[in-house]
Amino acid sequence: MEGSDSAETETADTLMTTVSHHHFGDEMDEPAFSISIIENMKEDYGLFVWPCSVVLAEYVWQQRLRFSGAGVVEVLGAGTSLPGLVAVKVGADVTLTDDSSRLEVLDNMKRVLDLNKLECNVLGLTWGVWDASTFSLHPKFILGADVLYDASAFDDLFATVTFLLQCSPGSVFITTYHNRSGHHLIEFLMVKWGLKCVKLLDAFSFMPSHKASGLSGNLQLAEIVLDSQRAEIPVLH
């Protein structure tokens, strides 16, 4: 697995299931803890640990003092949930979410929680759809790994992020993404939705060497907040 520390594979008639193991700690030989993730190589993309997820999970670990005791950490498009599970381990109150229609992904989140003997909320949340569960969320941190891949969903994603940021003054959206065409796209979306970037990092500037060696591509991390001068959600047409 790219970016994972180790993996075990089980093959069934139509499914290839892999359990990857991800270690976190200041010392490689003595990690503080490990997270096991169930991946399915022949299923939805949401059932694979992509490099952006590995990067965001490591960032949560390195920034653990910020996350410890945080009221809610909301993970958008959680998929295999690695960043959210690290947040649980460092003491955050986490809600993992993915598209409400992707029942197999939501079920996989619950299996991964059981595998790691962890507890948190699992919620179906579809970008751009407002229901009672959406209004109940008041996250301090919003996490999104590799969520900027489908241009047709960008407005729904940023509408959801902006709404959640407005619900929790002082909250932050932290996202990791492949910078395939420069930072211009995300800059355009931030201006459109009244957001601003307060931190932009190259992933390789903070990834430990033993993890960075398993990654490739131009991976970046951005911390995004409401722009106090433009905080109104635009009307979608």
Image: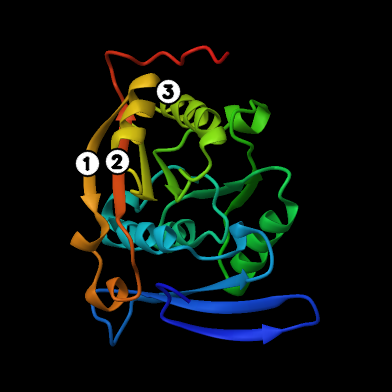
Earlier in the chain: of badge 3 and badge 2, it is 3
Residue positioned 56% across, 65% down in the render: 48
Give the alpha-carbon distance from disc 3 to disc 1, as whole Å: 19 Å
Image quarter where the C terminus lies is top right
Which quarter of the picture shows residue 44?
bottom right
Labelled disc at residue 166: 3
Q: Mark 2–mark 1 contact, CB under 8 Å?
A: yes
Q: Which residue is mark 2?
A: 223
Q: Which residue is mark 1?
A: 199
Relative to 117, say whether 160 is above or below: above
Residue positioned 44% across, 58% down in the render: 83
Can residue 121 be seen by looking at this rendering? Answer: yes
Q: Label 2: state its secondary structure.
A: strand
- At label 2, counting other C-alpha atoms closer than 10 Å, the crowd grade (few under 14, some 14-19, many 20 or more) is some
- At label 3, counting other C-alpha atoms closer than 10 Å, the crowd grade (few under 14, some 14-19, many 20 or more) is some
Residue 167 is left or right of residue 218, and the answer is right
Q: Label 1: state its secondary structure.
A: strand
Q: Mark 3–mark 2 contact, CB under 8 Å?
A: no
- At label 1, counting other C-alpha atoms closer than 10 Å, the crowd grade (few under 14, some 14-19, many 20 or more) is few
Give the alpha-carbon distance from disc 2 to disc 1, as whole Å: 5 Å
Q: Where is residue 148 shown, x and y percent of the image?
A: 45, 43
Relative to 193, say whether 216 is above or below: below
The disc labelled 3 sits on which kind of residue? Answer: Gln
Q: Nearer the viewer, residue 205 or 92?
A: 205
